[in-house]
Image (cartoon, helix red, strand yellow):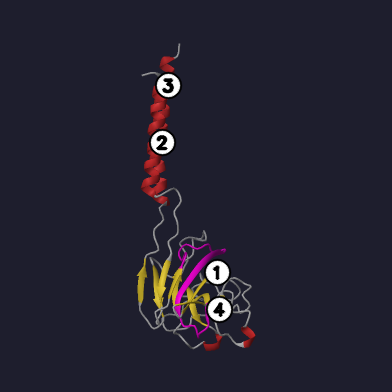
Amino acid sequence: MSNVSRRRSHRRRLVTAVGVVILATGGFAGTAAAASGTGPEGQTITVSKVDGLDPAGETITVHGEGYDLTKGIYVVVCVNNGAGQQPTPCLGGADMEGGGGASAWISSNPPSYGEGLATPFEEVGGKGSFDVQLSVAASDEFTDCLDPAQAPNGCVVGTRADHTRTADRSADVLIPITFASTGTGGEGGSTPGPSSTTAAGGGSNLAQTGASIIPAALAGLALLGGGVAAVAVRRRRTEETNRP
């Protein structure tokens, strides 16, 4: 076999190996899995990402369905005070003007001062739905989700009744969140392991949010790197042998 043929054969093998690594790991970059939760009145929320959030700030999307159109809610990130307890304080506070981005006020019948400030529900089958984006950071002037003294149970993302009915727990649909390592050792966050999908009134269902495929990809690339080195050595030896 000529040197040119050998080189072409080596390249084909490398391309095939790269394809195997990509297919085995689903790509070189993993995608964060969404998490869902169900409330006491059958409401549901789906959050685009709840684990490994950037402590410095990250934008997530929250979709909700099945809400009572007569009850206003906040979509928030708050300290987790346990099932049946109001989640508070909340990052960004109660953003009634909708300018901070850390929370959202959803209401189809707000008080007169809230008209134009609260976003109405989208009515679907007689129930309320919504889609909002939240800017989530680990801490602000109100609280710190990574400080055990301030948030011993970590923080949650979800919905609760607005300020017109703060004692009403029927709108609580809450999912614990975690934050990526801050570089001081360990991973911050509300709970270890998989995220819990929690409804007010007690009880929780474990919802796996997906494992990162990056470690598998890196392992595959390490093996591939060894193959590349071996090919390079063989190619160099062949060229030296065939030199005049």
Q: Which badge, 3 or 2, is on the more N-terminal residue?
A: 3
* Label 2 close to label 4 by CB (< 8 Å): no
Q: Which of 36 and 50 is in front in this view?
A: 36
User: What's the mark number on residue 134?
Assistant: 1
Mark 4: secondary structure: loop
**Residue range (magenta):** 47-74
Q: Does the magenta stretch include residue 236?
A: no
Label 1 packing within 10 angstroms: few (<14), some (14-19), many (20+): many
Element under disc 3: helix
Task: Identify the amino acid type marked 3.
Answer: Val
Q: In this view, does 218 lie to the left or right of 131?
A: left
Mark 4 → mark 1, Cα distance in angstroms: 17 Å
In the displayed image of the protein, which residue is found farthest to the top?
Answer: 244
Q: Which amino acid does label 4 sit on?
A: Pro
* 3 or 1: tag closer to the N-terminus: 3
Nearer the N terminus, badge 4 or badge 1? 4
Q: Residue 124 carries which label?
A: none
